[in-house]
Every structure is written in C-alpha cells, then in structure tokens.
Image: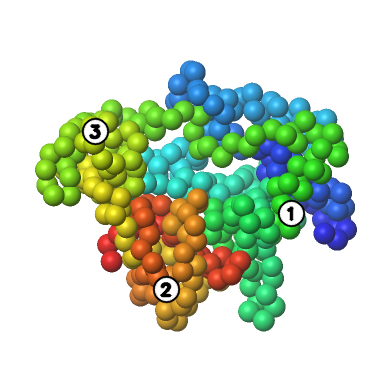
Amino acid sequence: MTMNRSTVLVGLSGGLDSTMAALLLRDAGYKVIGVSMKLWDGHSQPVHPEHRSCFGPHETQRLADVESMARSLELPFQVIDLSQEYREIVLNYFTQTYASGRTPNPCVRCNHKLKFDLLPAKARDRGLVFDYFATGHYARTEYNSEQDLFLLKRGVDSTKDQAYFLYALTQNQLTKTLFPLGDLTKVEVRAMARQRGLILADTEESQDFLSFEEYPQLFEQPPRPGPIFGTDGGLLGEHRGLHHYTIGQRRGLRLATGKPLYVIRIEPERNTLIIGSKQETYSDRCRIEHVHWISGVAPPGPIEVIARIRYKHRPARAIVKPQPDGSALLRFAQPQSAITPGQSAVLYQQDIVLGGGPISLQT
C-alpha cells in the first residue's frame, strides 16, 4: 500500500480485523476516522442474550469498548445511529423472508444497504469529510482499465471469502472502497496485531447475526405448529413453527424414525414441512432472482462460472444463463445438496466476483 494523504472513514466493529484495517491505513499515510453503526433499538430483544453478535443487548458495551479502543489508538471516532433503518431494511426483510418459507441472508443486505451506503452517507450528513470508506473484510478491489470498471475479488486468504457477502456492491461503491486486509491472511493479521501488543490479537471472532439462537423471537406472531410429511405423503409428526427450519436441516426435527431425515421443502401456504432422505436434498439447478452484476451489465449469453450457494458451501462448477427479466438460470456440473431459496448464490470466475442474487427453486 503506497503512502497517501487522503482521508478514510473506517467501519469499526471492535474486532481485530476492522481495528487492524484502520491501523494499516494510518501506517500508509491516510488520515483515518473511525465510525460504528448503532443497530440495536434498545428494547426488542431478550434481556439475557446468549452471546455477542452484530445485533442485540451487548451492543451498548461493544460500542463503549470500540470508543475506548479508538481513544487509546488516537483515532477520531463517532457512532452513527442506524437502528430504525436496520429494522426497516434488515430485520423486516429477515422476518418476511422466513415467513415466505425462504431462508434470508441478512449480512448481504446489511453490507449493501447500510454499511456501504447509509453509514458513509450519514457520516457526511454529520459534516465528516473523507475520500474513501474502508472495512476489515478479506476482499480486494482492482481497477480494470480495458473495461473501465472496478472488479471485486476474493481476498488472498483461501480460508476466507468475505467477498461473498459483498456481491451486491455497485460500481459507485467500489470506486471509493478500500479493503486493507485483502492481500493478507488472517494468520498474518494476528501476527501484526501481536507485534503491536493489541489484546485483540488472539480474540475469537464472531460472525453471528443475532445474540440469541431462536429467530422466532423477532416475529410479532408466535410460530404456529403444523404437520410434517414425508416425500411419500405420509404424516410423520408436528413441527414447532416453520421459522425454526431451513432446507437441508437435520437437527431439531424431533422425530424418532430410526434413520436420518432432512428438510426437503417448506410450504408456508399449508404451514407444512416436507422431509426426506439425504439424497432427496440434491439438485443440479436453480434460478437466481434479481441478479446483481458487479460490472452493471449481464453477460450476453450463458457462461461458465464457479458458484457458491451459501457462505460455507464449497464452490462448484456451473453454467449460468441470464434471463430477460433480470434473473438467471444456474445449472451445476454435479448435483448440490440443500440449494436453499432465499440464500445467496454468488458467481465467480477464478478469484473475481461476477455477481449474485437470492436463490429460487422455480426453474
């Protein structure tokens, strides 16, 4: 990273990665301003949360810790209240998606709509002046002069692909975004932190969305029990409410059948859960809705890609065929397990992120 006298607004979460991103940028000569999002509204979640996360009662202490850390590192710091926007944009989407029988990906939506959009915009409204916005994501950007566009690329650390959560970023956002950790591994970042004597160097990271496990606590109406059927139509039991389940799930079915069974389909219109064998979770195709292409333009025809259908999914070879309505058909070379409606399918060529969108099984 070359020396630079520009000003960078850095999103600070209080964790190792965002802290090191800020320090590396300052080392490179940037003027750094730290900022954190306030997301919790202060009353909507349980009094005794289970663990720290992005959203929940621990936030008050977390923000205090971030402010203390910024002060000790002599970084200017502000907190931007986005709790109302978070509820409208992320939590409402989360509950509505679950209610429709799909499984949401709140991190993608939060990054695109809040962290890389509303957060810097609100910071400017407060009078903060900066040239770039930066985060601790393990991702990279690169300007392609031949195409006159910015590429989004995976970080060099093969154990991380946080670019997966950023596929919805626009050219305008990428133009003014920096990822200082993109060319580093997590091991290298920890080593740098130890050299600086940071107590964060050996802390465990949390990528949890909520500070509690039972998602139905977010819903205004309590989960409604209903029937569980096998794929042969036989009644096998009763579920606790569809919000508790996702495609491919095995644990928590509470059925004594003597063999492993998995969620195959969720039918909210009948309040019904369909379960079956592991083999029945496999499919070689799906539709991607509202595909966002990083370049801003869909390919003119089918192209070969590597696709990821959830964050921990092992990337698989596929052909993607853009459709006139903005969706795309995705067909895998080999069937994949638990292709889940609502989750994000992200498309790559080598380490370049082409784009992605929410999954639909209607092909």
Q: Give the class, few, some or many, for how many residues have Cα within 10 Å of label 1's Cα (few <14, many ≥20).
A: some
Q: Amino acid at mark 1?
A: Leu
Question: Where residue 31 appears, x then y in whole percent?
Answer: 83, 48
Can see residue 197?
A: yes
Say left or right for 317 vs 178. left
Q: Circle 2 sits in a helix, a strand or a loop, which is it?
A: strand
Q: Earlier in the sequence, mark 3 or mark 2?
A: 3
Q: Circle 3 sits in a helix, a strand or a loop, which is it?
A: loop
Can see residue 112?
A: no
Q: Earlier in the sequence, mark 1 or mark 2?
A: 1
Foreground mark, 3 or 2? Answer: 3
CA distance for labels 3 and 2: 38 Å
Question: Where residue 64 appears, x then y in whole percent?
Answer: 69, 26
Residue 241 location, quadrant: top left
The label on residue 319 is: 2
CA distance for labels 3 and 1: 46 Å
Q: Earlier in the sequence, mark 3 or mark 1?
A: 1
Please report the residue visible at 42 percent of the width from the left and 79 percent of the height from the top.
302
Q: Give the class, few, some or many, for how many residues have Cα within 10 Å of label 2's Cα (few <14, many ≥20).
A: some
Residue holding disc 3: 255
Vertical relation: 171 (above or below) 8? below
45 or 126: which is nearer to us? Answer: 45
Say left or right for 283 vs 300. left
Please report the residue visible at 75 percent of the width from the left and 36 percent of the height from the top.
201
